[in-house]
Image (tube, helix red, strand yellow):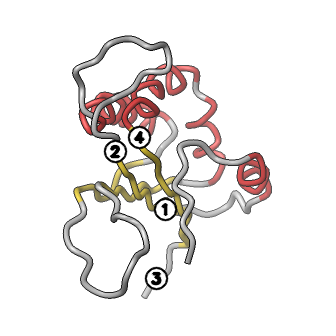
Amino acid sequence: MIINNRIMPSSEQLSKLHELDDSEPFCVLNLIKFKHKAEYADGRESQLTGAEAYAVYGKEQRRHLREVGAEVLLAGSLAELIIGEMETEKWDFFAIVKYPNKSALRSFFNNSDWAKSNEHRVAGLEGQVLISTKILNI
């Protein structure tokens, strides 16, 4: 298994997002790897760690999520790998976010306020993997 840890979606992934069924709620699993020290694109000096910069983004993000009807269901740090193996270091943090539909996710990413707070996300992230999920009633 090869894992390409990224910060932004590829153009192909964005295209697929626009093609998806928009009628049902779904969740997104976020797997996140932080930089040791935040690095801002504009070159500003920062004493923040990657996790601290991401926390600034996270605080602002919760408001943006509420605006589109989404919510963080679960978030936390990742501990020990219990089953399986990975060729890469494990992620530092995870979050599961529930969206009412795909339009809500698109609206979230297209919000100009989100774009402003995204600078903290990008400064703090080494990379991440986002996986959409289908909610099953089991």
What residue does disc 3 label?
Answer: 137
As measured in the structure, the alpha-carbon distance from the residue carrying label 4 to the one carrying label 1 is 21 Å
Q: Nearer the viewer, mark 4 or mark 3?
A: 4
Residue hosting label 2: 34
| Residue type, numbered disc 1 | Cys
Nearer to the camera, 55 or 135: 55
Q: Position of residue 113 (x, y in %)?
A: 51, 20
Q: Nearer the viewer, mark 3 or mark 1?
A: 1
Query: Residue at the location (24% across, 63% down)?
Result: 78
Which numbered marker is on residue 27?
A: 1
**Which residue lies under the disc numbered 4?**
125
Residue 66 in picture, x, y percent from top left? 41, 38
Q: Amino acid at mark 2?
A: Phe
Disc 1 versus disc 2: nearer the observer? 2
SS under mark 1: strand
Q: How many C-alpha atoms fall within 10 Å of the one at disc 2: few (<14), some, or many (≥20)? A: many
- The earlier-in-sequence mark between 4 and 3 is 4
Q: Earlier in the sequence, mark 4 or mark 2?
A: 2
Q: Earlier in the sequence, mark 3 or mark 1?
A: 1
Mark 4 is surrounded, within 10 Å at the Cα level, by few (under 14), some (14 to 19) or many (20 or more) other residues, namely: many
Query: Element at badge 3?
Result: loop
Question: Between tags 3 and 2, which lies in front?
Answer: 2
Tag 4 and tag 2, C-beta contact below 8 Å: yes
> Mark 3: which amino acid?
Asn
Q: Which x, y percent locates residue 34?
A: 34, 45
The residue type indicated by label 4 comes to Leu
